[in-house]
């Protein structure tokens, strides 16, 4: 009976719908990856993966400012910042068009960065209202369009080139940019918050982008494009699995906002453990199958077995991150993210001779650092902190150890939102 009740959980049902679209998107994405490797080789796929990593490092810090504020601000401010978001995305896409002839990889990175920011502006209303299944359905449709155009070129045209394949893959984003601007029309563009808030949120997502994508770039620089391609493929599969946890916790946005960020309003520890261990175990099992069953991807299987630990830890980290967003604990996310990124990149460099396996070990160790930090911060939540989230000082270490005598105090007035955007009382807040 308890299992049936768990399966009827509306949050799990909505997350399940979203995950279904994620699975579809990941399956066709994997087919696209295999097609790219089959037609152009693992080396060209490594170049493609590195360009995609650069796009994430460009887009994620910028878009995170809009993403987090969409969770916090009222509807009028949301609409004003959404048009700014669409304009920024369109500008980056235009920059990609300007440089593509000179550097296809750089142009592709800007195409994807601008296109994703515009696409996130287009999807932001659905995500704000707690409908991740709608968001992921649109993601899958865009991905299918890109793969259909670029994949058709690879299959039908003899001697296909990576540059033209990348250009065709980015073509659907042109439609996305136009739709984002059209949907957001009628509002006057607004700057998303004050400089200090934007700086923290930029650093927050910058840390995450470097953390999740910097290892691919560094590994490619220190080893070969082929090794970077193998590790990128393992990372794609691992992050695809953790998307289920992200969709799951997004269904708790409204409850967490109404509770002022109280962790008890989020998923229970038992459910979190089931989700994290299930995803991690499934990833390691896939790796084990690749190792046991004779095939040319046994090396990838070994990497996936290790990455299963990363998947379980990262699923937990994604759930904790959402709680920290609602609690306005931006300083902690920034500090933890950059610390974990430094640990990971340092280990990737030290273990470079081990190739993709060394990079996988680095991922697991860095994720442990991140999860331990987040757990300590989330568990420090108090009702008093929720009553005045904007008055919370930005600290750069978990609030567990006492302040050492003689240490300079951290300013208490370092609030993150302008007064006009201060969160409404819990009963009046708009869910994301």
Image (tube, rainbow, N blue to C red):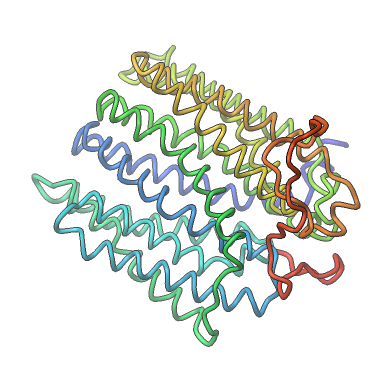
Nearer to the camera, 267 or 152 = 267
Tell me where residue 178 appears, x and y as whole percent: 38, 76
Q: Which residue is at a point 54% across and 38% down the rendered structure image?
A: 338
282 over 261 or under it: above or below: above
Q: Give the side of residue 296 with respect to residue 271, left or right.
A: left
On screen, residue 311 above or below 410: above
Residue found farthest to the left: 159
Indicate the position of residue 135 as horizontal and vertical percent values.
56, 60
Residue at image position (63%, 49%) is 247
Q: Position of residue 72 (x, y in %)?
A: 70, 64
Picture mark count:
0
| Residue located at (65% from left, 61% from top) | 131
Q: Between residues 111 and 294, which one lies in front from this camera angle? A: 111
Task: Determine the image quadrant of residue 316.
Answer: top right
Q: Quadrant of the C terminus?
A: bottom right
**Viewer-proximal residue among 296 and 180:** 180
Question: In the picture, which quadrant includes the N terminus?
Answer: top right
Q: Nearer the viewer, residue 175 or 203?
A: 203
Q: Residue at x 79, y 48 (%)?
A: 9
Direction from residue 66 to residue 331 in the image, left or right:
right
Q: Quadrant of residue 230?
A: top left
């Amino acid at each position: 009976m308890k299992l049936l009740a768990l399966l009827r959980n509306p949050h799990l049902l909505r997350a399940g719908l979203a995950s279904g679209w994620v699975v579809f998107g990941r399956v066709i994405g994997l087919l696209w990856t295999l097609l790219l490797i089959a037609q152009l080789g693992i080396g060209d796929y490594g170049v493609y993966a590195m360009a995609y990593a650069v796009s994430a490092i460009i887009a994620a810090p910028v878009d995170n400012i809009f993403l987090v504020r969409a969770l916090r601000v009222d509807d009028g401010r949301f609409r004003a910042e959404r048009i700014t978001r669409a304009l920024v995305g369109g500008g980056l896409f235009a920059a990609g068009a300007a440089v593509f002839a000179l550097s296809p990889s750089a142009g592709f990175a800007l195409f994807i960065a601008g296109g994703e920011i515009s696409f996130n502006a287009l999807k932001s209303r659905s995500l704000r209202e707690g409908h991740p299944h709608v968001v992921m359905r649109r993601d899958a449709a865009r991905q299918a369009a890109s793969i259909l155009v670029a994949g058709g070129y690879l299959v039908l045209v003899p001697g296909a080139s990576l540059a033209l394949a990348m250009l065709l893959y980015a073509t659907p984003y042109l439609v996305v940019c136009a739709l984002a601007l059209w949907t957001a029309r009628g509002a006057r563009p607004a700057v998303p918050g004050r400089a200090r808030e934007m700086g923290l949120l930029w650093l927050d997502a910058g840390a995450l982008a470097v953390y999740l994508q910097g290892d691919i770039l560094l590994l490619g620089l220190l080893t070969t494009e082929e090794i970077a391609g193998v590790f990128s493929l393992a990372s794609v599969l691992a992050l695809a699995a953790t998307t289920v946890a992200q969709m799951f916790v997004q269904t708790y946005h409204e409850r967490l906002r109404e509770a002022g960020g109280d962790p008890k309003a989020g998923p229970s520890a038992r459910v979190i453990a089931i989700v994290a261990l299930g995803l991690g175990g499934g990833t390691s099992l896939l790796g084990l199958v690749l190792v046991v069953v004779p095939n040319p991807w046994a090396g990838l299987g070994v990497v996936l077995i290790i990455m299963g630990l990363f998947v379980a830890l990262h699923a937990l980290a994604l759930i904790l991150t959402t709680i920290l967003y609602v609690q306005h604990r931006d300083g902690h996310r920034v500090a933890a993210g950059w610390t974990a990124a430094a640990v990971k990149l340092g280990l990737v460099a030290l273990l470079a001779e081990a190739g993709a396996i060394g990079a996988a070990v680095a991922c697991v160790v860095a994720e442990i650092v991140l999860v331990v930090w987040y757990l300590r911060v989330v568990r420090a939540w108090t009702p008093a902190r929720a009553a005045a989230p904007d008055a919370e000082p930005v600290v750069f270490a978990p609030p567990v150890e006492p302040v050492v005598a003689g240490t300079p105090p951290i300013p208490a007035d370092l609030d993150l939102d302008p007064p006009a955007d201060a969160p409404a009382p819990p009963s009046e807040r708009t869910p994301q």
